[in-house]
Image (spheres, rainbow, N blue to C red):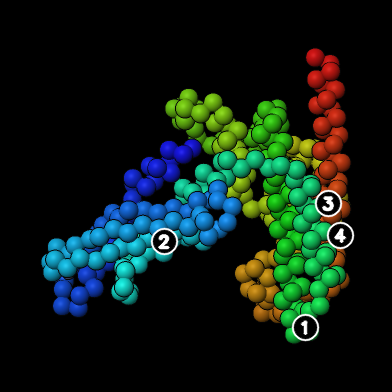
Amino acid sequence: MGSSKEQMHQNGLKVSFACPNADCEGHFEEEVQNASFDWGSERQSDGIGYAETSVECEICEDTFTVAVLATQTGKEVTLKGLTVADLEYIDDTFEHDYDEFLADYEPQDPFGVYTRSSKELDDLYYGSEILPRVQAPFNKMLYLQHIIAMEAYLSDRLIDIITTDSTKLLTLIGSTPSLRDRPTRLIEVAKDPDYVASTTKAHLQRFSFHDLANVAKFYKSVLNIDLFETDEHRKTLLAIIETRHDLVHRNGRDRNGNETVIDGPAVERVKEIFQGLIERIEDAYTKYKVSCFFQVLDT
Ligand SMILES: [Zn+2]
């Protein structure tokens, strides 16, 4: 794992820009020293990476310093002490660092995490004195946060099961065309004995777990549970996901430009609907764990 980070530094970062000297026609296409954010550090400020590279213009022979700053939101490449309009680079932050971070991540106690998150949101909701003019954005934030907590639970519970049970892994792959029919080179499998599990895990980690219609298929195959209890329940959940989209992508306006108002009852309702959903999944999960236990006794 550590080696890929070193390789990344060796690889460098490609940058291009026109020589900042106004009377010079020079153009830079450089591979400069890269910096990376350390996702493992406890404090975000400790994870910030920085690198400098000195480059010389072929035409005017003036030298410049390219600075790469790597934070958790991405990379910022600048010419030290100068403003350059056309400096171009491809931010590779989430191509390498984030993959590595995800591959190392093992969900622990998804239900406990969800319960604590939900409790904290309740504390915020019931324990805050909010100025009337910011009540609407406060409610929007809580509403979205409830959705995020639910998504994290759905993702982590599923990853937890398929990375510890090869039968469930097979069931999920068999019922998911994008995994089942994925072309695979034998060398990839030979290099990584956990190739199937790690590839499936990576797929799930990149999956948008608010896509409940497809998440329902995952859960049907792995825990044999219908996320949607009734047609009405399905419509309610999918409507919440549409509202999520409007809040995230249109700051609360629907496709016709109408404002979606998230009032107090809407926040409480979204919480209750997700709690009900997650408790049903946990029941199915408990039954599954019990059946695993008896299978072990039988053998
Ligand atoms: Zn120049």
The answer to which of marks 3 and 4 sits earlier in the sequence is 4
Q: Where residue 210 sits: x, y (%)?
A: 69, 55
Residue pictured at 65% horizontal, 74% vertical: 251
Describe the element under mark 1 as helix, strand or loop: loop
Q: Provide the residue designation for mark 3.
A: 277
Does the CB distance between marks 3 and 4 fall below 8 Å? no
The answer to which of marks 2 and 4 sits earlier in the sequence is 2
Describe the element under mark 4 as helix, strand or loop: helix
Mark 4 nearby-residue class (10 Å; few <14, some 14–19, many ≥20): few
Q: Provide the residue designation for mark 2.
A: 69
Which is nearer the eye, 24 or 206?
A: 24
Does the CB distance between marks 2 and 1 fall below 8 Å? no
Tell me how far mark 1 sits from mark 3, CA to CA: 32 Å
Question: What's under tag 2, amino acid-wise?
Answer: Leu
In the image, 34: left or right of 38?
A: left
Return the mark for residue 131: 1
Tell me how far mark 2 sits from mark 4, CA to CA: 43 Å
